[in-house]
Every structure is written in C-alpha cells, then in structure tokens.
Image (cartoon, rainbow, N blue to C red):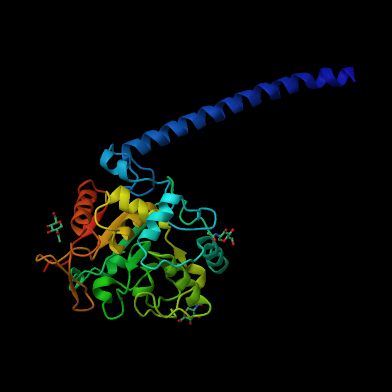
C-alpha cells in the first residue's frame, strides 16, 4: 500500500492544485460575467431583452410608486384567496347581493380552465412586444394592420372585430378581454380573458362551457361563446382594485376595460404599443366598427384621470401611442 501512495501522491497533489486553480478561474469568470451583465444592463437600463423595457429602472419615481410587479394580474387556485378589503371592494361593484360562494366558484373555474402561473417569466432574456388595440374610430384609414400583427401579443378589447377591418386593425388576436355583456366568439388561437367585475361573471364563464343556462345578468347575455377552453384566463379581482387605487388614485367608481387592459399589458409585456385609444376632439368616443358615440369622461370611469395617467406613461416612455387619424 505504501508504494502505491508514494507513487500517486504527486499526481493527486497536482490534480488538487489544478482543481483549485480551475475552480478559482471559474468563479472569477462568473464574477466578471455577472459584473459585465449588470453593467451592460444598467447602461441599457434593461431588465428584459428589448431595447427598452417596461421595467427599466430609469429612476422614475412616478412609475414605481404605481407599478407593483407583485400583484398577480391573472387568477389561479393558489393566488385566489381574496383579502377582506379586496373582497368587500369587489362586491361593492356588484348590484346583485347574490350569495354565490367565491371559493366554490374558483374551484369550479380551475377544474375547467388552466390553473397556471401565467406570464411569470419576465427576465433579462425575454423581449415580449405587445399591441394593445382599443376600439377608437381613429383606427379607420390608419393602415396599422401589419404593424399591429407584427407584435408577439395582440390584445383586443370587447367586441372590436378584425373581419372587414384587417388593413387598419390587423387580423391577429392573441388575447381578447371581455365580460358577459361584451362577449363575442373568439377563434381557437385566441385566449379568452375574462374581466370579472362581479362573481356573476365567473359563474357565467362556467355556464358558457358547461350548462349554458345563464342567459342574462343585468341585460341579456350570450349563453354560449366559441373559444378554446384550454386558453381561458381570468383577470384577478385584486388586480382590478390595484389598478383603481394605484393607477387611478380612486378616481371614478372603477377603471374602464381599456385602462385595465393597458395596465395588464404593462405587467405581462416588455414593450407596449397602444393603438385605437383616444376620443374625438369634441370629447366623444366612437368605435371603428359602429356609429355609437359616448362621452369620454361620462359614466363611472373617471375618464379624464385615465387620460392624464396614459399621457404620463407616454411622456416617460413606458408606452408608445399610435394615434391614427384624429377626427
Ligand atoms: C364556501 O364554501 C367553502 C367550501 O365549500 C366552505 O368551506 C365555506 O365555509 C363557504 N363559505 C361561505 C361564506 O359560505
Ligand atoms: C380551430 O378552429 C378551426 C376552425 O374553426 C378548426 O377547424 C380546428 O379544428 C380548430 N382547432 C382546434 C385545435 O380545436
Ligand atoms: C386626453 O389628453 C390629450 C393630451 O393631453 C388631449 O389632447 C385630449 O383632448 C384628452 N382627451 C380627452 C377626451 O380629454
């Protein structure tokens, strides 16, 4: 045994020294890499792989006082428990005093629809571009279709159609935000994203994919909708409250669908381009697809404050606005 040890010990010592050296170099490289990466990131400001990221830390206090990345935008079983104040606020939006058991509704929802941590993949390697497409008449004659379709996500709102308007609004829809009263069929490449202003809306979604027995809320609603069940998502009630408090500073009664969608995009995308937002110069909204006019700041939404907030987001470069044709 003794000769063997004598013979191998220089080798072992050599190997040992070499390993130490190797490990040292490896760590040194790791340290240098980390250093490079952070310095590259900080010159670019980038916490994502796009040229400019929503989460760029460009010392903007206004933004980071409002933006809270820990609020989950989309519901799943694990994040579904509502704090008392959230539940009370959310119930306060609802006219009905239904005795629906929220816990049971959530249970049913996620026995039907994907129960996932959606879009928790933000990081230095991700560059997800999003087009948020509103329904404003300023899209008409804009020829934005191709530009809109070039985004990774194309998020549309309520009934806004593409058929017949492809040249101006595009044809791709990855997500459509809707609620029972605004529901339309979506094709099976589109995520139906429910914006639940009330528990009844969640029950309606369940009904649509099962019994189809719910035919009205406060108005008649569609009992059926064509959509891929495996792509259904539900916006978190706590996210709606967060948008209202953090971003709207409690102006109006609750935020509009367009505004919630825009803040949702800030949370799930790295770069946000906005199309089809904005009223006519006389303050009236009109849709690109019908003649219905509504006044911008009327109703429950605190439209002026939404407008101000959107303008601020523009000013600090967190979103880009494609204004189309102002009428
Ligand atoms: C709702 O249902 C859950 C589970 O079935 C039950 O534990 C809970 O007590 C119910 N809550 C109310 C307020 O009825
Ligand atoms: C998607 O929809 C098309 C047309 O509506 C249909 O032919 C196709 O089978 C559907 N695909 C899936 C995976 O459901
Ligand atoms: C929204 O803000 C823009 C820019 O300040 C302004 O030109 C526009 O008139 C506002 N729209 C409404 C409806 O208040």
User: Residue 281: x, y in percent?
Assistant: 10, 65
Residue at 70 percent across and 21 percent down: it is 14
Q: Residue furthest left?
A: 282
Position of residue 304 relative to residue 108, above or below, is above
User: Residue 92: x, y in percent?
Assistant: 36, 59
Residue 288, quarter of the rendered image: bottom left
Q: Is residue 314 shown left or right of residue 106?
A: left
Along the line of sight, the residue nearer the viewer: 30 or 120: 120
Q: Is residue 115 shown left or right of residue 136?
A: right
User: Residue 197: x, y in percent?
Assistant: 37, 64
Count of numbered marks = 0
Q: Quadrant of the N terminus?
A: top right
Residue 45, quarter of the rendered image: top left
Along the line of sight, the residue nearer the viewer: 113 or 317: 113
Position of residue 84 relative to residue 155, above or below, is above
Q: Can the viewer see residue 128 in this picture?
A: no
Q: Is residue 222 shown left or right of residue 166?
A: right
Q: Quadrant of the C terminus?
A: bottom left
Q: Can the viewer see residue 190 in this picture?
A: yes
Along the line of sight, the residue nearer the viewer: 32 or 298: 298
User: Residue 194: x, y in percent?
Assistant: 41, 66
Residue at 28 percent across and 69 percent down: it is 146
Position of residue 297 relative to residue 23, above or below, is below
Position of residue 323 relative to residue 271, above or below, is below
């Amino acid at each position: 045994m003794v000769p063997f040890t004598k013979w191998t010990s220089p080798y072992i010592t050599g190997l040992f020294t070499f390993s130490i050296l190797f490990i040292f170099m490896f760590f040194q490289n790791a340290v240098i890499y980390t250093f490079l990466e952070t310095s590259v990131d900080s010159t670019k400001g980038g916490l994502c792989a796009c040229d400019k990221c929503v989460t760029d830390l460009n010392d903007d206090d206004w933004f980071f006082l409002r933006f809270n990345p820990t609020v989950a935008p989309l519901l799943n079983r694990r994040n579904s428990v509502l704090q008392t104040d959230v539940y009370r606020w959310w119930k306060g939006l609802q006219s009905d005093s239904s005795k629906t058991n929220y816990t049971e509704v959530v249970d049913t929802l996620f026995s039907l629809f994907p129960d996932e941590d959606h879009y928790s993949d933000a990081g230095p390697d991700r560059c997800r571009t999003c087009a948020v497409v509103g329904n404003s008449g300023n899209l008409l004659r804009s020829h934005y279709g191709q530009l809109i379709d070039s985004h990774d996500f194309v998020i549309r709102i309520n009934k806004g159609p593409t058929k017949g308007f492809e040249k101006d609004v595009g044809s791709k829809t990855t997500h459509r935000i809707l609620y029972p009263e605004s529901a339309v069929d979506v094709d099976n490449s589109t995520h139906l994203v429910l914006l639940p202003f009330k528990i009844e809306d969640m029950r309606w979604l369940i009904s649509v994919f099962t019994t189809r027995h719910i035919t009205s809320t406060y108005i008649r609603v569609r009992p059926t909708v064509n959509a891929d069940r495996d792509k259904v998502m539900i916006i978190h009630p706590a996210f709606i409250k967060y948008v209202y408090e953090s971003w709207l500073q409690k102006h109006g009664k609750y935020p509009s669908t367009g505004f919630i969608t825009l803040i949702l995009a800030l949370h799930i995308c790295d770069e946000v381009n906005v199309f089809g937002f904005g009223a006519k110069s006389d303050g009236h909204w009109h849709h690109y697809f019908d003649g219905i006019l509504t006044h911008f700041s009327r109703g429950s939404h605190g439209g002026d404050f939404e407008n101000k907030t959107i303008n601020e987001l523009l000013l600090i470069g967190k979103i880009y606005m494609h204004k189309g044709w102002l009428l």
